[in-house]
């Protein structure tokens, strides 16, 4: 399987070194997941990491859109056959969250378009090489307008009014997983930690009596474009269209698709979002990428997102004024930075998680 490089990187050298720090890396979700636990004894930290990793392995199996044997694959097969299927408490909350996020984003975030993702060739561990899909098939699938709201749930049984629905939680599952990871670490006695998984990162507690100081990758190279400080309990998610793509006739086509047209988006290269709800931050990073440079502020407001930084394909950085107050751009970077209006007007900054987390048993 292909290891996808993390979009976020640590910049903790300026923090006072802790008395104890445990770092471990695991492979799951097609990427390397790094755990950093501070202030706990080594045995407690390693036990907690092992417990979270077991949860991650179950998520990887049952939330996966194309690996056979998982619950989501079985549900998609039932939908395609026009059949109802009972869904476990491990998957059902993701369906409910996805419905809510689709509403909040005006349909720009839509995990029901798994068939479109598949026809583009992104339902594979390795990205497609040198081929375009049948665009007639793309248009035909998009015309069927699959939506999370085609699904109805009664007593844990899912029915779809549209056989074109195929669920793919890749746009926010890491956010859900990170939320669940830090919650579990906390119940196991961990007070200060970071869990970082290929573009998604969640924090717990602090970094040696300071805020966590993290780097956001420059999408134009392998360096860092800016550093940002996170408080404990916040998550930072970056959606980038430069890591996974298909290249045909010298043109790169992103894995991030516009649900309405079925076509890849290309106007924004990366979007970074901070929120206390990691699942929402992850979904919003995708939705704002689709919204593009003209509409991202309105979609951010609709989704209750205040801290946003986007980079377009010309290298221009757009950011909310709230985000700019928290970031420090790397010296020597030739950047054009455009500040948006404040996004906090009409948004409750202290919004906490409104979603229901799946249960781990």
Image (cartoon, helix red, strand yellow):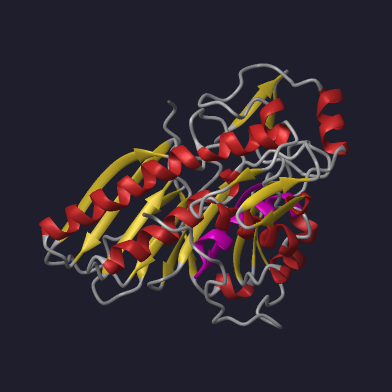
Q: Position of residue 103 (x, y in %)?
A: 74, 62
Q: Position of residue 129 (x, y in %)?
A: 61, 18
Residue at 23%, 72% in the rendered image? 208
Q: Position of residue 322 (x, y in %)?
A: 59, 75
Residue at 65%, 32% in the rendered image? 77
Which image quadrant for residue 269? top right
Report if residue 279 lies within the magenta region.
Answer: yes
Q: Is residue 283 visible?
A: yes
User: In the displayed structure, does residue 353 sit left or right of residue 210?
Assistant: right
Q: What is the total number of numbered labels drawn onto the structure image?
A: 0
Pick whichever, 354 or 219, lies toward us. 354
Residue at 58%, 62% in the rendered image? 280
Pick whichever, 224 or 78, lies toward us. 78
Residue at 62%, 74% in the rendered image? 321
Task: State whether residue 345 is above or below residue 178.
Answer: below
User: In the displayed structure, does residue 309 sit left or right of residue 153?
Assistant: left
Q: Quadrant of the N terminus?
A: top left
Q: Is residue 335 visible?
A: no
Pick whichever, 268 or 189, lies toward us. 189
Report if residue 334 lies within the magenta region.
Answer: no
Task: State whether residue 234 is above or below residue 157.
Answer: below
Pick whichever, 8 or 321, lies toward us. 8
Q: Main secondary structure of the magenta part?
A: helix
Task: State whether residue 305 is above or below residue 250.
Answer: below
Boundaries of the magenta span? 269-291
Q: Quadrant of the C terminus?
A: bottom left
User: In the displayed structure, does residue 122 sit left or right of residue 119?
Assistant: left
Q: Position of residue 349 (x, y in %)?
A: 58, 81
């Amino acid at each position: 399987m292909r290891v996808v490089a993390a979009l976020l990187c640590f910049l903790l050298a300026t923090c006072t070194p802790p008395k104890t720090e445990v770092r471990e890396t695991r492979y799951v979700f097609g990427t390397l997941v790094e755990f950093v636990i501070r202030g706990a004894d080594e045995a407690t930290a390693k036990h907690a990491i092992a417990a979270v990793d077991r949860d991650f392995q179950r998520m990887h199996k049952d939330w996966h859109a194309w690996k056979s044997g998982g619950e989501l694959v079985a549900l998609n097969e039932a939908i395609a056959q026009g059949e109802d299927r009972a869904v476990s408490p491990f998957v059902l909350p993701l369906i409910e969250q996805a419905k809510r996020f689709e509403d909040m984003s005006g349909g720009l975030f839509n995990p029901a378009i798994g068939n479109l993702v598949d026809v583009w060739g992104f339902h594979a561990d390795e990205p497609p090489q040198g081929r375009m899909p049948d665009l007639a098939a793309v248009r035909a699938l998009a015309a069927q307008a699959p939506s999370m709201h085609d699904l109805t749930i009664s007593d844990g049984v899912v029915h779809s009014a549209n056989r074109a629905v195929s669920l793919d939680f890749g746009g926010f599952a890491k956010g859900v997983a990170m939320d669940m990871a830090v919650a579990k670490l906390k119940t196991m006695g961990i007070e200060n930690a970071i869990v970082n998984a290929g573009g998604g990162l969640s924090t717990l507690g602090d970094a040696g009596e300071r805020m966590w100081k993290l780097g956001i990758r420059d999408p134009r190279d392998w360096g860092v474009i800016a550093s940002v400080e996170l408080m404990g309990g916040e998550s930072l998610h970056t959606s980038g269209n430069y890591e996974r793509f298909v290249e045909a006739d010298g043109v790169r086509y992103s894995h991030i698709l516009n649900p309405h047209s079925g076509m890849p988006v290309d106007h924004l290269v990366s979007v970074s979002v901070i929120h206390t709800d990691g699942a929402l931050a992850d979904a919003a990073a995708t939705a704002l990428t689709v919204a593009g440079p003209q509409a991202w502020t309105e979609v951010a407001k609709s989704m209750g997102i205040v801290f946003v930084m986007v980079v377009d394909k010309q290298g221009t950085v757009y950011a909310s004024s709230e985000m700019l107050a928290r970031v420090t751009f790397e010296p020597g970077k030739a950047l054009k930075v455009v500040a948006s209006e404040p996004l906090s007007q009409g948004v409750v900054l202290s919004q906490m998680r409104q979603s229901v987390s799946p249960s781990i048993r």
